[in-house]
Structures are given as C-alpha cells and as structure tokens.
C-alpha cells in the first residue's frame, strides 16, 4: 500500500495521505490558521510540494479523526 499518492482529477492535482507530516501543520487546525503558520519564504505550497514530490492543488488528510 502506498504511503501517499497524487491523483490528477479534472485538471487538479490532489495529494492524498493519512498523516501529513509537514512542519506547521497540525491535525487540529481551525479555518485560516494554516496560512498564518507559514512565513513568506516558507510557504504552504512549497512545503506540500516537498512532501508529495510535486506541486498539488489540494491536500486531503485522513488523520483528522
């Protein structure tokens, strides 16, 4: 079984993973808090690209229970 996967769906790259282990991301994130945790030179898109190995438009996490 793959640990993480990127799917192309209707022109969007969707990253799927159970536990997104990226600095600044917590499983309990109220709306708007994610963008406040990243500095200008350390953006969320760059962190997601480093994690998934390619740029993604959407990240879907299963570890939010």
Image (spheres, grey):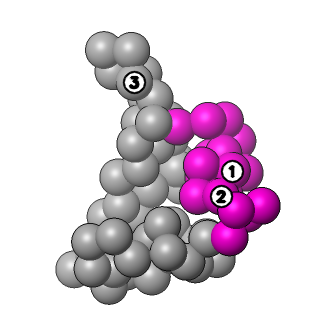
Question: Where's residue 52, x and y in %?
Answer: 62, 46
Magenta span covers which residues? 39-56
Question: Where's residue 21, x and y in %?
Answer: 58, 72
**Relative to residue 14, is residue 36 depicted above or below?**
below
Which residue was labeled with disc 1? Answer: 46
Question: Where's residue 40, x and y in %?
Answer: 70, 62
Mark 2 in CB contact with mark 3 (< 8 angstroms): no
Neighbor class of circle 1 (other Cα within 10 Å; few <14, some 14-19, many 20+) is few
**Relative to residue 22, is residue 44 depicted above or below?**
above
Which residue was labeled with disc 2? Answer: 43
Q: Can residue 51 be seen in this view?
A: no
- Residue 12's disc is 3
**Secondary structure state at the residue bearing disc 2:** loop
Q: Can residue 4 be seen in this view?
A: yes
Q: Which of marks 1 and 3 is in front?
A: 1
Q: Is residue 59 found left or right of 21 in the rendered image? A: left
- Of label 2 and label 3, which has the lower sequence position? 3
Question: Where's residue 4, x and y in %?
Answer: 52, 50
- Of label 1 and label 3, which has the lower sequence position? 3
What's the residue at 40%, 42% (across, down)? 58
Q: Is residue 16 found left or right of 51 in the rendered image? A: left
């Amino acid at each position: 079984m793959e640990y993480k996967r990127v799917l192309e769906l209707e022109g969007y790259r969707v990253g799927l993973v159970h536990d997104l282990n990226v600095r600044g991301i917590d499983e309990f994130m109220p709306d708007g808090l994610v963008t406040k945790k990243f500095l200008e030179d350390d953006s969320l898109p760059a962190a997601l690209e480093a994690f998934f190995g390619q740029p993604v438009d959407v990240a879907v996490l299963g570890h939010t229970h």
